[in-house]
């Protein structure tokens, strides 16, 4: 698995920004999606080493893996809501839409109540690229496209700061396939644990300790 990678809002790999360390950690969710972001950064998590901090994401990955059997990904029909009650409020399902000219986009088929509470809006029927702030939506869309290319799960911790308010959270993206070959849906699970920015910075510091 890849080690932690720090990205900017458009997915470019960058060096850790030392200014993160000077920010005062706050756990208050971002309440105004129309505010312009001061900073949006994401770190890719190593699925074998980093999910111990997020047991609900480890549960989601283990459940997904058990449903794969001999396929690269399970089908949507294999996912039984009764078996994932503990994470269900924080689950999103995104259809992978392919047009005749080969263009790919994503649209949320389902957004759990916990997701709606964080975003302060209903995301069902929306495209990730339409989520505000615009840079945040672009980051989410970029992550989905990477999973589409890799055809395997991917997890991140994401940090945002808007006008002195900040939030940091982790989530995992799990591919689904109705025919065992074409990736046609993504199952996204947000962790219940909402990190402070100091925890995000500590995650970034692990990069140096691993290299």
Image (cartoon, rainbow, N blue to C red):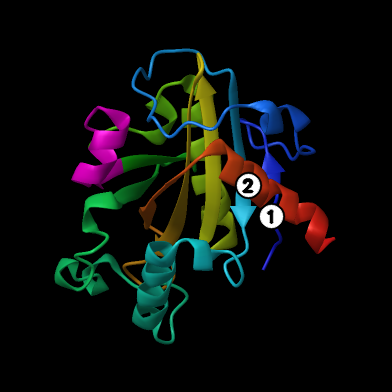
Q: Would residue 112 be found to the left or right of residue 199 on screen?
A: left
The answer to whether one can see residue 152 in this image is no
Label 1 sits on residue: 4
**Residue that sits furthest to the right in the current view:** 211
Please state the horizontal and vertical placement of residue 48, each as a whole percent of the image.
59, 72
Residue 33, x across and y down, in percent:
37, 20
Query: Mark 1 or 2 closer to N-term?
Result: 1
At x 81%, y 53%, the residue is 208
The alpha-carbon separation of the residues under discs 1 and 2 comes to 6 Å
Front residue of 133/158: it is 158
Query: Which dot marks residue 43?
Result: 2
| Quadrant of residue 198 within the rendered picture | top right
Q: Residue, x 31% and y 35% (percent of image)?
A: 118
The foreground one among 47 and 168 is 168
* Mark 2 burial class by Cα count in 10 Å: few <14, some 14-19, many 20+: many
Q: Which segment did they paint magenta?
A: 108-123
Q: In which quadrant will I find the C terminus?
A: bottom right
Find residue 131 and report its horizontal and vertical position in percent. 39, 27
**Residue 158 within the magenta-colored segment of the rendering:** no
Q: Is 69 situated above or below 126?
A: below
For the point 39% across and 41% down, which residue is it? 106
Magenta span includes 112: yes
Q: Residue at x 51, y 68 (%)?
A: 52
Element on which disc 1 rests: loop
Residue 29 picture location, percent across and down: 37, 30
Q: CB atoms at circles 1 and 2 under 8 Å apart?
A: yes
């Amino acid at each position: 698995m890849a080690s932690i990678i720090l990205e900017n809002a458009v997915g470019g790999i960058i060096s850790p920004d030392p200014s993160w360390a000077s920010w005062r950690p706050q756990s208050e969710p971002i309440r105004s999606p129309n505010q312009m972001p001061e900073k949006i950064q994401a770190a890719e998590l190593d699925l074998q080493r980093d999910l111990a901090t997020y047991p609900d994401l480890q549960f989601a990955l283990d459940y997904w893996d058990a449903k794969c059997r001999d396929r690269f990904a399970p089908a949507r029909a294999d996912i039984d809501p009764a078996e994932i009650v503990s994470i269900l409020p924080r689950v999103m399902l995104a259809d992978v839409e392919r047009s005749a000219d080969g263009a790919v986009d994503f649209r949320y088929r389902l957004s759990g109540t916990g997701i709606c509470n964080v975003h302060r809006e209903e995301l069902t029927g929306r495209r990730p690229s339409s989520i505000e702030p615009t840079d945040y939506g672009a980051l989410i869309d970029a992550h989905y496209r990477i999973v589409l290319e890799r055809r395997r799960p991917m997890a991140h911790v994401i940090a945002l700061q808007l006008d002195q308010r900040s939030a940091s959270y982790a989530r995992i993206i799990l591919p689904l396939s109705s025919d065992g070959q074409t990736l046609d849906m993504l199952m996204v699970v947000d962790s219940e644990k909402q990190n402070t920015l100091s925890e995000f910075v500590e995650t970034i510091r692990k990069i140096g300790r691993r290299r």
